[in-house]
Amino acid sequence: MDDNDEKYKLLNTKEVARLLFGSEEESNTKKVRRLARNGTIKHFRNGKHYLFNKAELPGATNNTSREQDNSCSRGEGISHRSQQRISTE
């Protein structure tokens, strides 16, 4: 499969759950369906089945290996109050 075919590949909910969340557990497939219903993820419907264009998925890359991001959204994992206590000591 060349890059052009990969661009238009359609995935089902289990495949998207594995790609975005790392597993095909039912909780992750439900999360994918919920994101689709809310309009967060673009999708197509075929009857009751959801189909997703791989190229339009958030975070979907050609890299098949998953790299874990250990960063924290709040300043290197230390809370604001902890930073104040450290700076005042």
Image (spheres, rainbow, N blue to C red):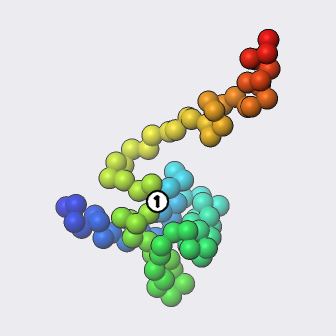
Q: Disc count in the image?
A: 1
Identified at 74% across, 31% down, the residue is 80
Give percent across and percent down for residue 19: 46, 56
Percent position (x, y) of residue 43? 47, 75
Which residue is at 46% across, 80% downward? Answer: 44
Question: What amino acid is at disc 1?
Answer: Pro
Q: Is residue 18 visible?
A: no
Residue 49 in the image, given as x and y percentages of width and height: 51, 80
Are there few (<14), some (14-19), or many (20+) residues within 10 Å of tag 1? few
Closest to the observer, 82 or 67: 82
Place residue 36 in its image quadrant. bottom right
Q: Residue at x 44, y 44 (%)?
A: 66
Q: In the rendered view, would you say 18 is above or below 69?
A: below
Judging by the rendered image, the residue that carries numbered circle 1 is 58
Quadrant placement of the C terminus = top right
* Residue 39 picture location, percent across and down: 56, 74
Q: Given the current orientation, which residue lies at the most extreme top position?
A: 89
